[in-house]
Amino acid sequence: MKKVAIIASIVAIVILSYFLFEPVFTYWLTRTESPNFEILLPTTTHADAVSEEADELLINKFRLLKAPSLSVSIGIDDSVVWSNSIGYSDVENKRLVDSTTKYRIGSVSKTITSIGLGLLLQSKALNPNSIVGDYVPYVTGDLTNLTVKELASHTSGIRNYGTCMCLPLWEYYDNDHYHSTEESVSIFADDELLFAPGKAFSYSSYNYTLLSAVIEGASKQEYRDYIQSNVLEPLNLTQTIPDNVLQPAPNTAVFYDFEGDYLSTAFAVDNSNKWAGGGYLSTPTDLVKFGNGILNNSLLDEDTKALLFNPVKLADGQVNEQNYALGWRNDLSKKVFSDGREVRIIHHGGTAAGSTAILVLLPEYNASISLAMNKSGSTADLFDIAFKLAELFLTEHKRE
């Protein structure tokens, strides 16, 4: 009997360990040698010299990244001037990527929320100092006095993802489904703020979970419905949708983690607790159309855009450490082109389980560019080629 009890205890510990550390087990159980991506070519062949050079840049970057796939799109004025993609959206089944392949865009989702917020600011339904408690009846304590501006700029003091008494152990890998924004807010609703609101900067997607609750209260619509009817549909963004495990989207990439020459399928997460801050799927072409619409004032006027794009100052009068505005980072002056000229860059990157994406706006050139890959990684891996490609097409556009 004692031996049976010991065996039962060991089995119980193994099972508990598996569920506590399920993402780790998933990585090792699905780990396989990476196929040869060197043989792959872009899905589109371009004939003109500039586009051919862009295709070559794409191929070279793809091989350096060792990602299953890489997709990119560039817009100038109100047009998509070039797009291309290379690699597998599904490695196991050798399914090639195309321009409609959807990627998790992670925190680039915050830019979508920002524009939805901007519409409410523009219509005076909200203002930057509107407080949570006036629009979200189910919150209490410190959260009630937080402002829209503090939430959207990560200066509220709300914590980021942590460990939890849950399976798996890390909130980042949460795979529970949340049926309402109220349920999602409950994850952090009772936790102390990290600092007095407005005093410091601390990046946290939970800010946007609560911001989506304010948007619901101000618009009288569920967050996703509001975004769909007021942001996505007016800009004809047909490939941009919530990453909903209950309604899998067609032509969505399979997401991967890489280590050296090995890849594994990314842990299956449920993004329903962070639609507004990191829960959307999209394509680079849709994101460029989104960027074009913002730059060309299709939804927002110049004053509202300035409100969203201006970096937020802390209580001491200093701009926050990331030049973060209301849903966008704003590098006011940066040398990214080969001639050393300074450029203003409005941007956001996003990392998600098995996926990485960026969206960059260049207001002085009325240009936007987006890239995505179905590999966990750093957004820094994508910014360098973004600026090289942008310079290539901006130079050609200037000649014309």
Image (cartoon, grey):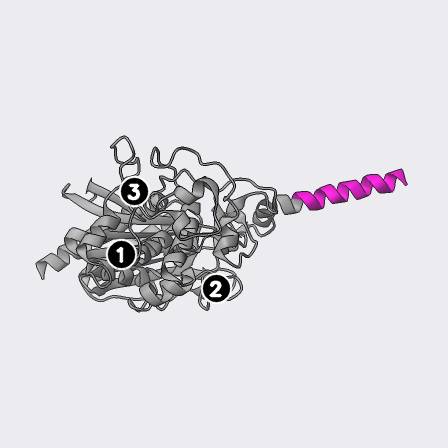
Real-space CA distance between mark 3 and mark 2, rounded to the nearest whole angstrom = 40 Å
Secondary structure under tag 1 reads loop
Labels 1 and 2: the sequence-earlier one = 2
What residue does disc 1 label? 124
Q: Quadrant of the N terminus?
A: top right
Labels 3 and 2: the sequence-earlier one = 2
Kind of residue at disc 2:
Lys
How far across and down, in percent of the image, does residue 351 sit? 41, 48
Describe residue 56's horizontal placement relative to residue 249 as left or right: left
Please state which of residues 126 and 297 is positioned toward the viewer in this rendering: 126
How far across and down, in percent of the image, does residue 67 sit? 42, 52
Q: How many marks?
A: 3
Kind of residue at disc 1:
Lys
**Quadrant housing residue 282:** bottom left
Please tell me the numbered disc located at residue 324: 3
Real-space CA distance between mark 1 and mark 3, rounded to the nearest whole angstrom = 23 Å
Residue drawn at (14%, 54%), measured in percent from left and top?
395
**Quadrant housing residue 235:** bottom left
Real-space CA distance between mark 1 and mark 2, rounded to the nearest whole angstrom = 50 Å
Q: Quadrant of the C terminus?
A: bottom left
Residue drawn at (81%, 42%), measured in percent from left and top?
7
Whether residue 108 is visible here, answered yes or no, is yes
Q: Residue furthest left?
A: 399
Please state which of residues 117 and 62 is positioned toward the viewer in this rendering: 117
Kind of residue at disc 3:
Tyr
What residue does disc 2 label? 94
State which region is magenta: 1-17
Magenta stretch: dominant secondary structure: helix
Q: Is residue 15 magenta?
A: yes
How far across and down, in percent of the image, does residue 347 sit? 28, 49
Residue drawn at (53%, 64%), measured in percent from left and top?
246
